[in-house]
Amino acid sequence: LVRTSDIWTRLGPHTPVVVADGGVIAAEISPAVRAYHANLVKHLGLEVHLGEWFEITQDAIDTFAALTKDTQWIHLDEDRARRESPFRGTVAQGFLIVSMIPALRAYDSLASQTEFPVRMVVNCGVDRVRFHHPVKPGSRIRARTLLKKAELNRKYVQ
């Protein structure tokens, strides 16, 4: 039994809890989830996925602009971008590149891997995103996944 005031220091912010009789106890974690987590921990700091190359085209940039209403000339006007942009041409929207993450990560191929089987992926946000280099039409991009952290939860590993 853990007092409510101690919950974050004793259990951590991501530990599922059950409240009973005014106290708080940690919920049970399944052996399968514990084993999966233990396997991931062995691979912390390692590359666990390297995706296929994907070419960013001007058509993809134009389509994304139409859908999101991000129609700045730097993305769409090839002549003006060639003349006035420091990049000497159009560039992809940063959020186009971010939105490509599910496709680049190839979740279907991850699901078939035996070492890191994935049943479901939920996009719960993006932390500390920075765009260090412009992505021009004709550029090829791919995902490289390094395992930095594996948090244990009652029914899953995040």
Image (tube, grey):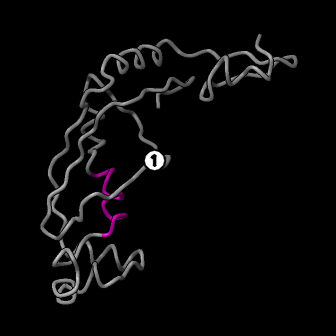
Residue 12's spot in the image, x, y percent? Answer: 62, 23
Q: Residues within 10 Å of mark 1 (few under 14, many from 20)?
A: few
Where is the N terminus found, in terms of image quarters? top right
The answer to whether 39 appears left or right of 142 in the picture is right
The residue lying toward the viewer, choosing from 62 and 107, is: 62
The residue lying toward the viewer, choosing from 68 and 147, is: 147
Q: Which residue matches tag 1?
A: 127
Residue situated furthest right in the rendering: 22
Q: Is residue 98 magenta?
A: yes
At 51% from the left and 23% from the top, the residue drawn is 152
At 28% from the left and 78% from the top, the residue drawn is 75
Residue 47's spot in the image, x, y percent? Answer: 24, 31
The residue lying toward the viewer, choosing from 76 and 31, is: 76
The answer to whether 110 appears left or right of 20 in the picture is left
Please identify the quarter of the rendering in which residue 18 is found. top right
Q: Is residue 140 magenta?
A: no
Please identify the quarter of the rendering in which residue 62 is found. bottom left
At 36% from the left and 59% from the top, the residue drawn is 99
The residue lying toward the viewer, choosing from 131 and 75, is: 131
The answer to whether 54 appears left or right of 39 in the picture is left
At 79% from the left and 22% from the top, the residue drawn is 4
Is 92 located above or below residue 116 in the figure? below
Is 98 located above or below residue 155 in the figure? below
Is 72 located above or below residue 142 in the figure? below
Q: Which residues are magenta?
A: 93-103
Q: Name the main secondary structure of what is drawn in magenta.
A: helix
**For the residue labelled by badge 1, is the local secondary structure a helix, a strand or a loop?**
loop
